[in-house]
Amino acid sequence: MKKKLIIVILTISFAISGHAQDLKGTVFFDDFESYNAGEQLVVQNPTDWTTWTNSPGSDEDPFIIDTLAYSGTQSVIIVDSNDLVKPIDNYTEGRFGISFKMYIPEGFLGYFNTLQLFDGINSLWGMQVFFEEDGNGRCVGQTTIYFNYSYNTWFNNDIIVDLDNDWAKYFFNNLLIHEWTWSQGGSFSGINQLGGSNFYSWDDNGTGIPKYFIDDYQIEELESPCFDPPQNISYSYISPNEILLEWDPPNCPNLLGYNIYIDGVLVAFITGTSYLIELGPGTYEICVTAVYETGESDCAYITIIITGIKENIINQIQIYPNPASDLININSDIKLKSIRLYNFTGQIIESKKKLNCKSYQLITLHFTRGVYLFRIETQEGIINKRIIIK
């Protein structure tokens, strides 16, 4: 029997990053309930808060109010010349989430930024968000993305800064609005560092009136997500045009399954760790990714080139009877090293290693009826053969 020669070049590309929001710990939280309403915030807590020019009690220092709040009874109002800063300890590694609630009365403006460095006129911005008139919003981080918001309601702002990968995301009301290279959020001369939050009463166009409220400000440290790709990918062939891919699952939580791509086209999503592909002559790039609840890994690649014809070891192995009921015999002209039997959901039903023999008998009385797949490793290579148990 003639057999097409299959040459397989195997490379594995590992996942770089992901952004699952797994909480590692709370760094800071302020719901503004512990302060005296009607008094300025930084005067009451200069340890955690400051103003742009480090001037507690000045016009930059905002007041605590008890007439509007998201939780409890108090929040902080940003209006007039207020310029509030929450300094952060210039983190240069790790992943952090900044979140807070914001409320903008109808007809007014809102604004905040997140800093790479807080240092007065030498400060560096990582991103800015403008809440302009008529419910138009824009997030500026390397590029500008526009969105809409509503007056007279509390909404969520979430900023994720991944310093390990120099990447950031902005979520408005839990919807991803923008993502960008963090160090280039304000300019190309920025730095990969997290240095603070700034709430400024800023009218960008000079035609409106800034006025907004902040509540439940929080900084969290986030776990680095695990998005590893499939591991230890291998292959074997069943017939001249059929390839069986196999791999080990990655050691990451929240794994849903695997995507199979051929030449960049998604052809299947599966939950098992093997996949049968039928291919004609040619060159193919096959990618297998791990799919998680919050993202997808990079590819584990295999390039398959089907180029020629030659005698194959398939012709040297006999499996009988097929179909089988009580037992299966395997006879080979070359020594057998190991045998695995899979059902067609990819589960291993039987596994024998270190055989070092030319014949093997498998009792099948206890097997469920159906189609099975033998993976037979010999001294000259690996083959697969289908059998039916009735």
Image (cartoon, rainbow, N blue to C red):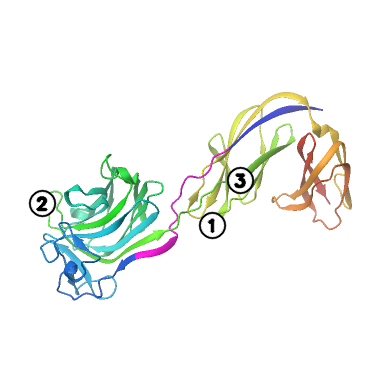
Q: Quadrant of residue 4?
A: top right
Q: Quadrant of residue 110?
A: bottom left
- Dot 2 crowding, Cα within 10 Å, few <14, some 14–19, many 20+: few
- Does residue 229 show up? yes
Q: Which residue is mark 3?
A: 231
Is residue 345 one of those drawn in magenta? no
Secondary element at tag 2? loop
Tally of numbered tags: 3
Secondary element at tag 3? strand
Q: Quadrant of residue 330?
A: top right
- Dot 3 crowding, Cα within 10 Å, few <14, some 14–19, many 20+: some
Which amino acid lies under the numbered mark 3 shown in the image of this protein?
Gln
Distance, label 2 to label 1, CA atoms, is 49 Å
Residue 269 % position (x, y):
58, 47
Of label 2 and label 1, which has the lower sequence position? 2
Of label 3 and label 2, which has the lower sequence position? 2
Q: Relative to 28, is 235 above or below?
A: above
Give the foreground label among 1 and 3.
3
Magenta range: 12-27
Q: Residue at x 58, y 53 (%)?
A: 251
Give the foreground label among 3 and 2.
3
Q: Which residue is mark 1?
A: 254
Which amino acid lies under the numbered mark 2 shown in the image of this protein?
Thr
Distance, label 1 to label 3, CA atoms, is 16 Å
